[in-house]
């Protein structure tokens, strides 16, 4: 890709994602009702959404769960060992998983409503996927060995691991700390569990990351986290309280990342591929 064009596109993304109307647009997307091939009363919207989520296509991918746990583990180890050389592969994989989240978690075929699509989730997840694919081409993330780090770079790693582990019994929704879930739970194909992992990686290398990517990933994560807080702790706490606990990493990491991404003075200039990585990493 032409360097001048790459920088121009990245500058546009940085500028657009900082605008108030961009955030408003993301919020307005939430009012798009879910699609169902069988007509439904608008009063049933919440029920339609819950039905689609509970019967999403991803539930039929159970045999693939281990693969989507092993691959990110290998990729993160690769970032630790050879971060700069493996950053593109990591970004491509992240983009692929967000694409899968859009199709596998937002779509279902149900008995009552037929084919159902949670359009707002699909659009947000798809947009995040596009930005991760863009990052793979643009190379804005600087994953070279970090220098001096602050607590702000490290704290998200533990809750992100907790989300990735996904210690919950899928049948009873009760706590289950079986270590085998680290490699077998469905967290690897779940937006809510993998987003804390991707954000934790970006936060670890912050501020030498793609700010537009950090901004949109965190904003989407926060919106989905708030939905989950409402369902798990307000509407069905007697059944889903532990599921709510598992979504706390998404809430707190997304909120923290979003604050950093919008913090005044942290607008990062598009990365020059000819620039040597000699900048000292500033404390958060």
Image: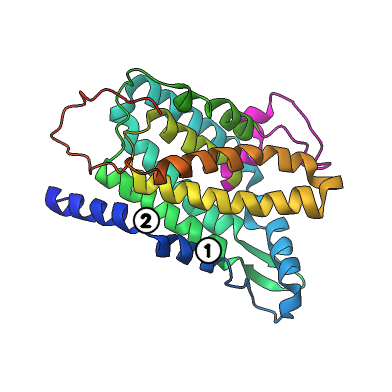
Image point (72%, 38%), residue name: 245
Q: Is residue 122 above or below residue 248?
A: below
For residue 235, side relative to residue 52 (left or right): right
The answer to whether residue 186 is magenta is: yes
Name the N-terminal-most of marks 2 and 1. 2
Q: Which percent across, then down, holds residue 102?
A: 53, 57
The residue depicted at 41 percent of the width and 29 percent of the height is: 284
Are dots 2 and 1 in contact, CB under 8 Å? no
Label the magenta part by its dominant secondary structure.
loop
- Give the magenta range: 166-191
The residue beneath circle 2 is 17
At 79% from the left and 46% from the top, the residue drawn is 240
What coloring was used for the rendering? rainbow
- Image quadrant where residue 188 sits: top right
Q: Is any atom of residue 64 visible in this view?
A: no
Q: How many marks?
A: 2
Estimate the x, y position of residue 260 in percent, counting from the top left: 43, 40
Tell me the number on the disc at residue 62: none
Q: Closest to the observer: 95 or 221? A: 221
Residue 27, numbered label? 1
| Residue found farthest to the top | 148
| Disc 2 secondary structure class | loop
Mark 1 Cα within 10 Å, few/some/many (few <14, many 20+)?
A: some
Q: Quadrant of residue 159?
A: top right
Of residues 227 and 111, the one drawn nearer to the viewer in this rendering:
227
The reply, left or right, for residue 261 in relation to residue 31 is left
Mark 2 is surrounded, within 10 Å at the Cα level, by few (under 14), some (14 to 19) or many (20 or more) other residues, namely some
Question: In the picture provided, is 127 more to the left or to the right than 185?
Answer: left
In the image, residue 41 lies at what x, y percent?
Answer: 74, 81
User: What residue occupies the far right of the structure in this picture?
Assistant: 238
Residue 236, x across and y down, in percent: 82, 52
- Cα–Cα span, label 2 and label 1: 13 Å
């Amino acid at each position: 890709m032409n360097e001048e064009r790459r920088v121009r596109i990245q500058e546009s993304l940085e500028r657009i994602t900082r605008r108030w109307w961009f955030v408003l647009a993301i919020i307005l997307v939430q009012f798009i009702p879910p699609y169902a091939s069988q007509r439904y009363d608008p009063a049933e919207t919440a029920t339609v959404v819950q039905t689609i989520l509970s019967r999403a296509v991803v539930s039929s991918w159970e045999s693939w769960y281990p693969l989507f746990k092993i691959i990110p583990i290998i990729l993160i180890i690769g970032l630790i060992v050879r971060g700069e050389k493996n950053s593109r592969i990591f970004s491509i994989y992240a983009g692929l998983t967000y694409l899968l989240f859009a199709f596998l978690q937002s779509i279902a075929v149900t008995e009552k409503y037929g084919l159902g699509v949670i359009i707002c989730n699909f659009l947000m997840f798809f947009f995040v996927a596009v930005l991760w694919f863009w990052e793979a081409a643009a190379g804005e993330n600087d994953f070279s060995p970090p220098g001096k780090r602050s607590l702000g770079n490290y704290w998200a790693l533990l809750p992100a691991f907790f989300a990735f582990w996904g210690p919950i019994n899928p049948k009873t929704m009760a706590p289950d700390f079986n270590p085998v879930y680290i490699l077998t739970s469905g967290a690897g194909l779940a937006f809510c569990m993998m987003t804390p992992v991707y954000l934790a990686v970006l936060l670890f290398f912050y501020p030498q990351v793609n700010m537009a990517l950090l901004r949109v990933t965190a904003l989407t994560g926060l919106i989905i986290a708030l939905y989950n807080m409402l369902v798990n702790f307000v509407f069905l706490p007697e059944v889903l309280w532990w599921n709510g606990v598992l979504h706390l990493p998404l809430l707190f990491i997304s909120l923290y990342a979003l604050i950093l991404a919008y913090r005044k003075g942290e607008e990062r200039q598009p990365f020059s591929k000819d620039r040597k990585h000699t900048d000292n990493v500033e404390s958060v």
